[in-house]
Image (spheres, rainbow, N blue to C red):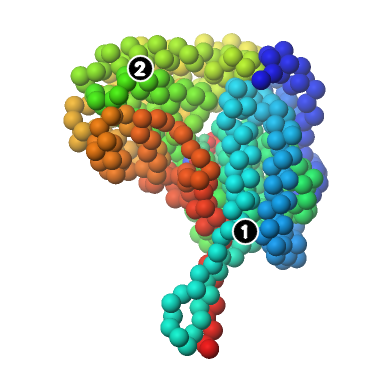
């Protein structure tokens, strides 16, 4: 990997594009309005970004619809679509350091996470999905001898995608790779806090041969561009990743407009259950620390609720504090940095508010604590561990989306399961035990879309990602993602 000084030097020469990308080219917002993109580590302006609204959404959706109807992408031979998307992935790989820098500078994530996780995973997602598209078959239904019923999967048309800022490039890739591979046109609204990598992605899509209008990127705010996209009468499917609050609003917009299908990947408050029979307390503690402090805790699957069996609690907390020491806030451009700043001052204030609330409700801060913000020096929080927590406390119930861990205890397996499920969310969960039967029993009973046993957060393009309850409905990644972006058609022929 490059050195700190090399990353810094490259960051200063980066060519940043803030205009909207519509119909194969950059353009200003129709209104001419812009908003500043700020580097959260320096609080300096990166670039002014087009502030798109309804007028831009109308343009982009019209261009997406026209190209969809033309068939140049939607009816292209799947093998050819695959080849173009593979070329796109190759181009992203050729510019991988640039992508790493874009997200690091735009939202504060450490450059080492970008290099080791976000960029390779985004490339893999595009390659894997593209590779799958000429291997998905339709069905013939068993309707009897005198009819033939053909069940096929067709692209839906225009997909609207709305994404968050915590994994900008990766979350965008999880949405647009399957949507495009299936033959759809896409209008993407990335988060206003991190639009830059998505814009570069669209530029490279054109270079790879994806026809103009197939992928449009509209930077802008949720209540303007996002809402207009969600209300648009000519968008067939809305694919969203973000908070549970906005997810609910999108369902309302769909009902108010054209009943577009809405796929939601929403918030989380994932539990981490550590049993006394876990194989190794040290590695369980290291896993628990990564599960809350990776990416500054700005992770939807962050295990922010830790439940430890009472008999090992004191030993476990000591190991946890030691393991958490690995996460030290610092300049995200330094490859040694394990924790960057929070995305902005709003998120930092949220972290501060929840730490205060934890203290007021009887929590014991054993590591970290309130942020010490200095104006102009970045929005840094401290990795914070609060013991003596229980499910009745506000900071244990609500998603913080920051590096704040609640440590609670349990005595029996039944109690651990009940505490884990006592949440409106159901995204991920981790279980640490060396008892195979317990691992299966607990995994079955936990109400979540994903369970990790003796690990946390691991994934692969082959496995689906998503939640239940207030954490959403759809699944990103794997062949299941394609289901979101296709309609099932039945053609029945009397023979
Ligand atoms: P957010 O809901 O505030 O914003 C997400 C996106 O929605 C942004 O692009 C925003 O501009 C847009 N938006 C906001 N208001 C809108 C409106 N009225 N109409 C249309 N669009 C609107 O979420 P965030 O702060 O960007 O991201 C953090 C949240 O995302 C957390 O809750 C986190 O758990 C969740 N998340 C979930 C997953 C998952 O896979 N389940 C993954 C990553 C993040």
Q: Which residue is mark 1?
A: 134
x, y (%) of residue 444? 29, 44
x, y (%) of residue 453? 35, 34
User: What's the residue at 70%, 35% (across, down)?
Assistant: 93
Indicate the quadrant where residue 437 lies. top left
Indicate the quadrant where residue 42 lies. top right
Q: Let me know if residue 95 appears in the view.
A: yes
Nearer the observer, 203 or 128? 128
Describe the element under mark 2 as helix, strand or loop.
helix
User: What's the residue at 48%, 13% (across, down)?
Assistant: 326
Pointer 2 or 1: first along the chain = 1
Q: Is residue 73 left or right of residue 373?
A: right
Question: Which mark is drawn over residue 427?
Answer: none
Task: Dividing the image into four quarters, tell me where ligand 1 lies.
Answer: top right
x, y (%) of residue 181? 64, 54
x, y (%) of residue 380? 55, 16
Nearer the observer, 259 or 317? 317
The answer to whether marks 2 and 1 mark residues whose Cβ atoms lie closer than 8 Å is: no
User: What's the residue at 79%, 45% (across, down)?
Assistant: 207
Q: CA distance from mark 2 to mark 1?
A: 45 Å
Q: Which residue is mark 2?
A: 282
Q: Is residue 81 left or right of residue 321?
A: right
């Amino acid at each position: 990997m490059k050195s700190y000084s090399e990353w810094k030097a490259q960051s200063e020469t980066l060519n940043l594009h803030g205009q909207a990308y519509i119909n194969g080219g950059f353009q200003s917002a129709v209104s001419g309005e812009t908003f500043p993109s700020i580097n959260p580590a320096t609080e300096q302006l990166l670039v002014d970004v087009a502030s798109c609204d309804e007028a831009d959404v109308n343009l982009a959706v019209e261009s997406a619809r026209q190209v969809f109807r033309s068939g140049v992408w939607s009816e292209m031979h799947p093998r050819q679509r695959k080849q173009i998307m593979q070329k796109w992935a190759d181009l992203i790989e050729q510019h991988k350091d640039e992508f790493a820098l874009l997200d690091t500078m735009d939202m504060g994530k450490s450059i080492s996470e970008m290099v080791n996780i976000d960029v390779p995973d985004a490339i893999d997602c595009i390659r894997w999905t593209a590779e799958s598209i000429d291997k998905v078959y339709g069905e013939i239904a068993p309707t009897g001898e005198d009819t033939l019923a053909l069940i096929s999967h067709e692209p839906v048309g225009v997909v609207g995608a709305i994404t968050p800022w915590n994994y900008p490039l990766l979350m965008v890739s999880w949405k647009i790779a399957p949507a495009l591979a299936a033959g759809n046109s896409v209008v993407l609204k990335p988060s206003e806090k991190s639009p830059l990598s998505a814009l570069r992605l669209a530029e490279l899509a054109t270079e790879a041969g994806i026809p103009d209008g197939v992928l449009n990127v509209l930077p802008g705010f949720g209540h303007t561009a996002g809402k207009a996209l969600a209300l648009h009468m000519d968008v067939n499917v809305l694919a969203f990743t973000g908070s549970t609050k906005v997810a609910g609003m999108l369902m309302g917009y769909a009902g108010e407009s054209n009943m577009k299908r809405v796929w939601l990947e929403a918030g989380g408050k994932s539990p981490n259950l550590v049993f006394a029979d876990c194989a190794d307390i040290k590695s369980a503690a290291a896993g628990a620390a990564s599960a809350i402090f990776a990416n500054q805790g700005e992770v939807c699957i962050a295990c922010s609720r830790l439940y430890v069996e009472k008999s090992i609690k004191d030993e476990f907390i000591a190991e946890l504090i030691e393991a958490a020491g690995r996460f030290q806030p610092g300049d995200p451009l330094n490859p040694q940095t394990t924790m960057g700043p929070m995305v902005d001052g709003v998120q930092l204030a949220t972290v501060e508010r929840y730490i205060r609330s934890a203290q007021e409700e009887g929590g014991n801060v054993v590591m970290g604590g309130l942020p010490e913000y200095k104006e102009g020096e970045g929005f840094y929080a401290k990795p914070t561990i609060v013991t003596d927590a229980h499910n009745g406390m506000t900071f244990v119930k609500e998603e913080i989306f920051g590096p704040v861990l609640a440590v609670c205890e349990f005595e029996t397996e039944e109690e651990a399961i009940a505490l884990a499920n006592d949440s409106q969310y159901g995204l991920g969960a981790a279980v640490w035990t060396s008892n195979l039967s317990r691992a299966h029993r607990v995994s079955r009973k936990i109400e979540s879309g994903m369970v990790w046993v003796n690990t946390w957060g691991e994934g692969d393009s082959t496995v689906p990602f998503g939640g239940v309850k207030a954490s959403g409905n759809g699944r990103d990644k794997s062949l299941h993602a394609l289901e979101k972006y296709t309609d099932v058609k039945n053609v029945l022929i009397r023979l």
